Every structure is written in C-alpha cells, then in structure tokens.
C-alpha cells in the first residue's frame, strides 16, 4: 500500500477546461443550445426536461437543481422510489439516467482540451507537472515513496498524462490481481470504462489501443479560448467500439452518481473502493486537491473514517482549495490525531498548480531535489 495518497476532485481538472460541478449544467445547456452536441441532442433535452420536473421539489426543499451532482443523485433517487411525475415506468427512469450519463460524457469531451505543440499532443496543465512530482516521489526522493491517486473525476486528464509519460497505472478493477502500476482509483467511474457483455466485468479501454484507431478531434474550446491548437479525446463517446475478451462492451461508459446510495454499483466497483480504503489506511501523507467534500457526499466520509481506522502514523493531511469553507469541512471530518497534522491552503496555494509546488515542502531531503525537479518539470513542459 502507499505512503503518499493524493485525492483529486473536479477543481484539479478545471484548468483543463472541465467545468466545476456548480456550473457543469450551465455549460452543458450552452453546448446544447449552441448546437455543439447535435449527435446527443435528445439526451440533453431529456435531462433538462427532467430538471424542469424537479423545480417543484426545489421550491419546497433545499435541492440544488443547478448542481450536476445533486441532479444526478435526484434522478437516482427517482429510480429507487419508482415513480415521479411523468417518470412513472422503469423504462422512462432508466432513460433519464442514461441521458444524464451521456450529457456528462459529451460535456466533458467538448470542454476538456489537450494542448498541442506541433505534432506533440500534450497533457493539460498542470497534469504533466503532477506526473513529474509522482515520478520524483517514487524514483528519486530520499527515501523513495509509494504513491497512489484517489479521484472523483470521470475525465481522462491524469490517465493521459500518465500514458504520455509512460507511467503505468492500476485501476484496481480486479481485487485479485497484483499491483501492476500506480493505483489510479476512480471512485465514480471513468470515460474509458465499460461493462463487458461477455465476462460481465468492468473493462478499461487502454489509451494506446484507442489512440491507435482514432484521429484527434478539434475541441470546442468552450473554456480554453487562449489555446491556439488543441485536441479532444472522445473515448467515452466511442466506447461502444471497444471489444473485451472477444465481446463488444455496452455502449456507455461506467459513470457512477456521487451519492451515498451506490448499492447498484457495489458488485462492480467494490474492488476500487476497497483498494481506496486500504490506501488511506496505510497513508502517511494525504494531499487533497480540488475536492470540496460536499455535505451530500456521505460515501467518502464513511470511506475515510473506516479506511483510516488503523494504527498508521499520519504525518501530513493537507487540503488545497481556493474556498476556505472546504478546509472547515475537513476539520469536521478529521479526528484529533489527524487534526494535529492538518493544514488548509486557500489564500495563496489553493490551486492545483500551487499545490504541486507546496507538496514538495513535505519531503525535505539531504539531496536537495529542487534543481532536479526544476529540470524534470522543464522536460515535462517541453514534451
């Protein structure tokens, strides 16, 4: 298990163009109305019709119909209840949830952009730099540290950065297999994961396989107008082409709603969640970047509480987020021992880029790695 655990949320991918949860639906609506998602127009229409149906609930409760996580959770609850206004059959409810997944996939793919320098398609900033830090900790720190990443993001930003820098990852989808790379634990699923219709397992579509079959697409650049040349990764939209163990996978990525009620997904994702708990159990350093710990996410609260119920010695628990309220939420989550090691960075070091530099302060070494890291980060930025 890992000594260093990074926990990444939506804020970590924001500079890559992916909307935050709070404005995700606004961006999706703009894409729909501007005609940029014509191949998925019916799904977008279905989702926003569903949101309209929730407005009556919103007027009588605190349901945030502008937050994609809250809406996705509400759609899942409709499935549990089995009836809500015009969604009075299992087929209509399943269609609404499938439409929501399509909206999530298309919105991420249309806004997430990979910068390019000539023929070299790079990882979005600052993921190349983050990869350099991970490699430094594993290979060149004194002593070297084992590292894992827990993420709530569906996007492929870190997956591509690791792929581009030849860092092998282990998604931990098989709880019986040995660790074969850096654990990249995507708690809510991923755009490149799909259910195999043959073996019934969740299978990841390797990036090298996808990229060998597809040309790069030019993205909309909804939030990245300053990029002169960039490309998008449409692996989620094309997931139905993927074959695993001789069978085609189902035609939609594995996208799990960010709610406590994950019973429908337990059989498939329990190996990932179990590995995440084990990583937290043994962690000496925990760095949270861009994850706001929303009050509705009881799942992570239980995962953290049960995962860290051990005798390990926690040396650092640092949270990076521009919103100071996030630090206060984590203070309420942590026990006395962890609070002694806790720091919240928001005024000057709350962003992903600043967090990368600040993390190094936790690993002083007699080898003075500063020059080495500057060189490696420079190599990353140069491709």
Image: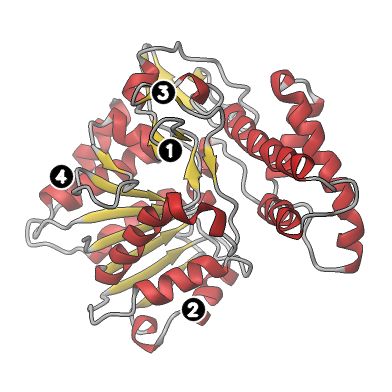
Q: Quadrant of residue 382?
A: top left
- Mark sitting on residue 200: 1
- Mark sitting on residue 375: none
State left or right for residue 135 relative to residue 160.
left
Between residue 357 and residue 285, name the one nearer to us.
Answer: 285
Q: Callout 4: few (<14), some (14-19), or many (20+) C-alpha neighbours within 10 Å?
A: few
**Looking at the image, which residue is at 16% across and 46% down?**
371
At mark 2, the secondary structure is helix
Marks 1,4: beta carbons within 8 A:
no
Asked which colour scheme the image uses, the reply is secondary structure
- Of labels 2 and 4, earlier in sequence is 2
Marks 1,2: beta carbons within 8 A:
no
* Foreground tag (1 vs 4): 1
Q: Is residue 155 above or below residue 231?
A: below
Marks 4 and 3, how far apart at CA: 46 Å
Between residue 112 and residue 115, name the one nearer to us.
Answer: 112
State left or right for residue 112 relative to residue 76.
left
């Amino acid at each position: 298990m890992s000594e260093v655990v990074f926990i990444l949320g939506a804020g970590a991918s924001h500079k890559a163009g992916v909307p935050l949860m709070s404005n995700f639906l606004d961006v999706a609506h703009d894409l729909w109305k501007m005609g940029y998602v014509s191949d998925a127009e019916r799904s977008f229409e279905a989702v926003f019709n569903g949101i309209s149906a929730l407005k009556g609930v919103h007027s009588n409760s605190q349901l945030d119909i502008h937050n994609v996580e809250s809406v996705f959770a509400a759609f899942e609850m409709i499935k549990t209840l089995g009836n809500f206004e015009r969604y009075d059959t299992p087929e209509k409810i399943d269609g609404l949830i499938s439409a929501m997944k399509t909206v999530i996939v298309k919105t991420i793919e249309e806004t997430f952009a990979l910068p390019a320098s000539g023929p070299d398609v790079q990882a979005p900033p600052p993921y190349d730099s983050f990869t350099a830090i991970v490699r430094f900790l594993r290979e060149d720190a004194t002593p070297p540290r084992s590292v894992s990443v827990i993420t709530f993001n569906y996007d492929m930003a870190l997956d591509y950065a690791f792929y581009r820098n030849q860092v092998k990852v282990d998604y931990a989808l098989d709880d019986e297999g040995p660790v074969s790379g850096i654990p990249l634990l995507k708690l809510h699923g991923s755009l490149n994961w799909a259910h195999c219709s043959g073996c019934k397992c969740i299978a990841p579509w390797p990036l090298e396989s996808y990229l060998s079959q597809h040309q790069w697409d030019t993205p909309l650049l909804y939030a990245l107008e300053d990029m002169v040349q960039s490309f998008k990764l449409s692996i989620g939209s094309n997931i139905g082409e993927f074959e695993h163990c001789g069978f085609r996978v189902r035609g939609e990525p594995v996208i799990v709603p960010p709610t406590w009620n994950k019973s429908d997904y337990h059989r498939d994702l329990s190996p990932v969640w179990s590995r995440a708990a084990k990583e937290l159990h043994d962690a000496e350093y925990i760095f949270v970047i861009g994850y706001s710990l929303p009050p509705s996410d009881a799942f992570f609260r239980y995962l953290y509480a049960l995962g860290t119920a051990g005798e390990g010695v926690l040396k650092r628990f640092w949270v990076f987020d521009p919103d100071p309220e996030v630090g206060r939420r984590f203070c309420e989550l942590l026990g006395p021992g962890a609070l002694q090691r806790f720091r919240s960075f928001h005024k000057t070091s709350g962003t992903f880029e600043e967090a990368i530099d600040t993390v190094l302060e936790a690993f002083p070494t007699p080898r003075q790695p500063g020059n080495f890291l500057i060189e490696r980060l420079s190599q990353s930025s140069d491709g």
